[in-house]
Image (cartoon, rainbow, N blue to C red):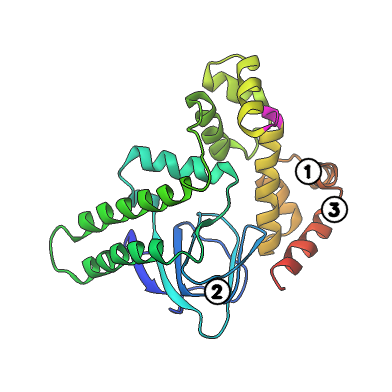
Amino acid sequence: MIDPIQVHRIDHKNHYDYTQQHRHSYFEIMFFLHGGGKNLIDFVDYEVKSNACYLIYPGQIHLLNRAPGSHGYVIQFQISAIASLPLQRLLQEQAWSGLGAVFFEEHEPSMHNAMQIVELIGGCAQSKSLYRRESQQHLLQALLFDLFSVRSTKTEVKPLDFDFYLFLQLIDVHFKGNQNVGFYLERLHISEKKLAVLSQKYLGLSPLQIIHQRILLEAKRLLVTGQQPHKEIAYDLGFDSPGSFSAFMKKKTGHTASEIQVQMTEIHKQ
């Protein structure tokens, strides 16, 4: 992406092979005025419905198979386009919440409201104003707050305790090569007991399980893209050998890395 915010029709031609599973470094908000097809996001298969909105995060595996007649718009944006710190935190917390990618489906009033802002964001791109980017950023933030408000009416998500928020943030940055809970405790300056209580409260897991969960997710993402041999993936994720990586995958999933790769690839072919 050249501009931090871009608006396109869903059927626009991307610079990459969008017919294969892929991942990118920016966010996408997809609006489908008319549905049809499948939208595969991080190994979850969503049926594309009309008057629906979906969010894809940076780094997620994605493959859209549109049915004939399916159409809408997509907004692509970098995190740098979000100046609001509360909104940055909201985006991160929603990514960790496990709620999925759906903002709304088959809800014409929400689509009508969203399209009004989307049109304004797109119109700013054609403007010669010196402040067009600032206008786009404010409009995008208003859109996102509105979309999260729609979601919150269906599922209440309470803000995370700040220490736990920092723990998850640290994992996202350091999970490659840092599986030791002590590494994170040293940077959080909280007790092991408190971190264990917070981890159980919010995710129902131990701190170590949360770290392993993040490593496993990244391993699946790397395996499904098929761009690296397993040996490189092992070292990229911080394992000291391909054997220890294979043992980790087998213990956590009951399957070898090769078996998982086949399974994940087949999911994205259906």
Give the left or right position of residue 141, taking residue 73 as reference. left
Magenta stretch bounds: 204-208
Are the residues at dot 1 and dot 3 in contact (C-beta closer than 8 Å)? no
Looking at the picture, how far across and down is residue 194, in whole percent? 61, 17
Circle 2 crowding by C-alpha within 10 Å: few under 14, some 14–19, many from 20: some
Are the residues at dot 2 and dot 1 in contact (C-beta closer than 8 Å)? no
* Label 1 – label 3 distance at C-alpha: 15 Å
Looking at the picture, how far across and down is residue 108, in whole percent? 42, 67
Does the magenta-highlighted stretch encompass residue 202? no
Looking at the picture, how far across and down is residue 201, in whole percent? 63, 27
Q: Name the residue: 62% across, 73% down.
A: 20
Q: Amino acid at mark 3?
A: Thr
Residue placed under numbered mark 1 in the picture: 241
* Label 2 – label 1 distance at C-alpha: 33 Å
Towards the viewer: 31 or 258:
31
Secondary structure of residue under mark 1: loop
